Amino acid sequence: RSGTLTRTLLQTPGTAQILSIAVHPDGQRIAIGFSNYIQLRDLRTNRPLHNLAANASVSQLLNFSPDGRHFVNTDWLGDRLRVWRL
């Protein structure tokens, strides 16, 4: 393994910052947490699948369930947990 960059998936528009990521168990999808929304993307095509409303305008904690059927997110404060069916 060389540690060589193989591709760039996303360049954020304007001042948007990627704050967190999670990879789906199938390895084909990724969740990207921005300050006010979460984007699910297809890694094969590099196209967005869904934009989900964020809990708050702070960093997101993201994770997929082990079976890949659900997605969860919360903010750093941890006062709300959202579960999404995929």
Image (cartoon, rainbow, N blue to C red):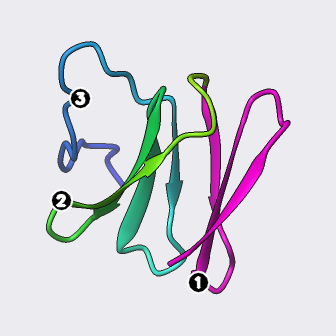
User: In terms of secondary structure, where does tag 2 sit?
Assistant: loop
Q: Is residue 37 left or right of residue 2?
A: right
List the residue tagged with mark 2: 46
Q: Amino acid at mark 1?
A: Arg
User: In terms of secondary structure, where does tag 1 sit?
Assistant: loop
Which comes sooner in the sequence, label 1 or label 2? 2
Q: Residue at x 18, y 25 (%)?
A: 13
List the residue tagged with mark 3: 12
Q: Is residue 75 left or right of residue 9?
A: right
Is residue 8 or residue 58 the one in the foreground?
58
Is residue 22 or residue 79 the one in the foreground?
79
Which comes sooner in the sequence, label 3 or label 2? 3
Give coordinates of residue 39: x percent, y percent: 37, 50
Give coordinates of residue 50: x percent, y percent: 33, 61
**CB-based contact (under 8 Å), mark 1 and mark 2:** no
User: In terms of secondary structure, where does tag 3 sit?
Assistant: loop
Q: Residue at x 62, y 29 (%)?
A: 56
Q: Amino acid at mark 2?
A: Asn
In the displayed orientation, state which residue is furthest to the top: 15
List the residue tagged with mark 1: 69
The N terminus lies in quadrant: bottom left
Vertically, is 70 above or below 8?
below
